[in-house]
Image (cartoon, grey):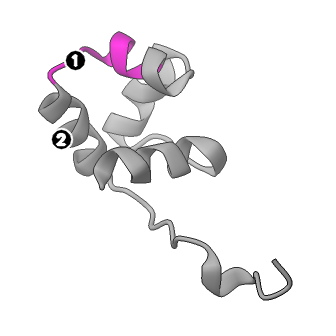
Amino acid sequence: MREFDATCLTPVDQLSASEIQAMRERAGVSQAVFASYLNVKPKLVSEWERGEKKPSGPSLKLLSIVKA
């Protein structure tokens, strides 16, 4: 654990609106269901997919896991 530093963390890249929408569609779920999976409001997923807002923090980390 003493050797743990930033190089041990998985890098998280920003996602475009189209990438987020493609992930949701690939999962075959609605925005409401996708929001439920990520524990966010459906309106926020809609805003991500329209490019009005960008995911950050835990939401971005969860999306990067879904993308992988």
Element marked by disc 1 = loop
Measured in 3D between alpha carbons, the distance from the residue under mark 1 to the one under mark 2, in whole angstroms, is 11 Å
The secondary structure making up most of the magenta span is helix
Q: Residues within 10 Å of mark 1 (few under 14, many from 20)?
A: few
- Quadrant where the image shows the N terminus: bottom right
Tell me residue 4's x, y (percent).
Answer: 76, 81
Q: Could you tell me which residue is drawn at 51 percent across and 73 percent down?
A: 11
Q: Could you tell me which residue is drawn at 63 percent across and 86 percent down?
A: 7
Tell me residue 37's x, y (percent).
Answer: 44, 21
Q: Is 42 drawn above or below residue 68 in the view shown?
A: above
Amino acid beneath label 1? Val
Pointer 2 residue: 22
Residue 32 or residue 8, whichever sits in front: 8
With 36 as the anchor, is 29 left or right in this view? Answer: left
Q: Residues within 10 Å of mark 2 (few under 14, many from 20)?
A: some
Element marked by disc 2 = helix
| Highlighted range, magenta | 28-35
Q: Could you tell me which residue is drawn at 23 percent across and 40 percent down?
A: 23
The part of the image, by quadrant, that contains residue 30 is top left
Q: Is 34 drawn above or below residue 1 in the view shown?
A: above
Extreme residue in the right direction: 2
Amino acid beneath label 2? Ala
Residue 32 is a magenta residue: yes
Tell me residue 43's x, y (percent).
Answer: 47, 18
Residue 54 can be seen, yes or no: no
Residue 29 is a magenta residue: yes
Q: Which mark is residue 54?
A: none
Residue 10 can be seen, yes or no: yes
Pointer 1 residue: 29
The part of the image, by quadrant, that contains residue 3 is bottom right
Q: Could you tell me which residue is drawn at 56 percent across and 21 percent down?
A: 39
With 50 as the anchor, is 13 left or right in this view? Answer: right
